[in-house]
Image: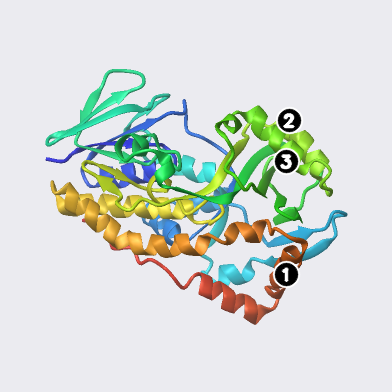
Amino acid sequence: MIRTVLISGAGIAGPTLAYWLLRYGFEPTIIERAPAPRIGGYMIDFWGVGFDVAERMGLIPCLKQQSYQIREVSFLDRRGKRLAGFGWNAFRAALNDRFFSILRGDLASRIFEEIQDKVEVLFGNTVQGIVQDDRGVQVTFEAGASRRFDLVIAADGLHSVVRNLAFGDELQFEKYLGYCIASFTVPGYTHRDEGAYVGYNVPRRMVARYALRDNRTGFLFVFEQKDKPSLTLHERSAQQRLLQDLYEGAGWECPAILEAMRSCKDFYFDAVSQIRVENWARGRVALVGDAGFCPSLLAGEGSAFAMAGAYLLAGELRNAGDDYQTAFRNYQSQFGPFIQRKQKGARGLAGWFAPKTKIGLFVRNKVTNLMAVPWIANYTMRRMVSDRFALPAASA
């Protein structure tokens, strides 16, 4: 009988999956490399299928309390003069107000709170080896003795350890989109625009800031990098040196932002990539969230897709009983076509954040300003949200 499930990753997909598996009578265990739940992180827009799953988990009231009501997006010139922008009201109206912005870490923390006292969680550890047989999976941990589980689910993100062990090297699944992203938060930054997402561009580079509670400010860098950064850039000092080289002398508030970066505690850096895996399961190991279908960091719905994928996977495991292979197939056949459409639509988004030429910036700004026209905003937003995925009812 299928009961014990090891979930690698305590971000968003992993705890969501554990929540639903627990509800359906399974015995999930989470393993997470970090020593504790990660907090903070960059701002995400939360809507669509993720909102639907969170609502079924009863999380919307508390998530709204932790959220931020961003009223507008503005792009400025090097002297701080507004060049372009649009408001979020049309977007909220198109979604019937089922939309808010929240720090990714705040979303993950709130989901984790739902399961932390009900599920075994192995922090500060990771999977080192996987051996499957017809009765289960023998899992070797980096720290501690090996254990057996009926199933193993990779919910450990773009750079999934479990996917590498069970499916093969990351390079065969990663599609690098030619850009990189960095983010961090700091207290006491001088410039604040409450309720606004404020960006500045030069060709191939963007930096933006947004005001947070407790006098903190978040920053986001998006920049073109033709070749994917080498492994040496996994060191924070090298990552920050690259940003220093790219943005020093770029204008606007870049000197102050780079200076603030030196003292940040939560620096994040990664390539903008998609993960495309033809089959989301191999034997008793399956993928969920960014580990299986990362749409890219700039697509805006990765967290929502992770929650929806976890919800669907748990439901199919519940429906299929011991026939986990059928559960895995049904999970992908339901969600896979939707994900493929979303990944296809996301491939050009990085160019909107960081156009490559001055002409490209000019066009982006002009198109952005058209969003101030109500009927254009309404038409555009409704087209953006028309491709919705209808979640099945939760299993009894």
Q: Outermost residue, right direction?
A: 79
Q: Which-is-in-front pick, marks 1 and 3?
A: 1
Is residue 188 visible to us here? Answer: no
In percent of width and height, residue 52 lies at: 41, 60
Label 3 near label 2: C-beta < 8 Å? no
The structure residue drawn at horizontal position 70% and vertical position 69%, both measured from the top left corner, is 368
Q: What label sits on residue 215 in the rendered view?
A: 3
Q: Outermost residue, top direction?
A: 144
Vertical relation: 324 (above or below) 387: above
Vertical relation: 4 (above or below) 43: above
In depth, the one of 192 and 382 nearer the eye is 382
Q: Measure how far apart labels 1 and 3 are at the Cα level.
A: 34 Å
Vertical relation: 258 (above or below) 393: above
The structure residue drawn at horizontal position 85% and vertical position 54%, both measured from the top left corner, is 78
In percent of width and height, residue 79 lies at: 88, 54
Badge 3 element: loop
Q: Tell me which amino acid carries mark 2.
A: Arg
Q: Which-is-in-front pick, marks 2 and 3?
A: 2
Q: Tell me which amino acid carries mark 1.
A: Val
Task: Look at mark 2 in the image and give the residue it sits on.
Answer: 262
Examine the image and state in which quarter residue 199 appears.
bottom right
Q: What label sits on residue 363 in the rendered view?
A: 1
The structure residue drawn at horizontal position 72% and vertical position 69%, both measured from the top left corner, is 363
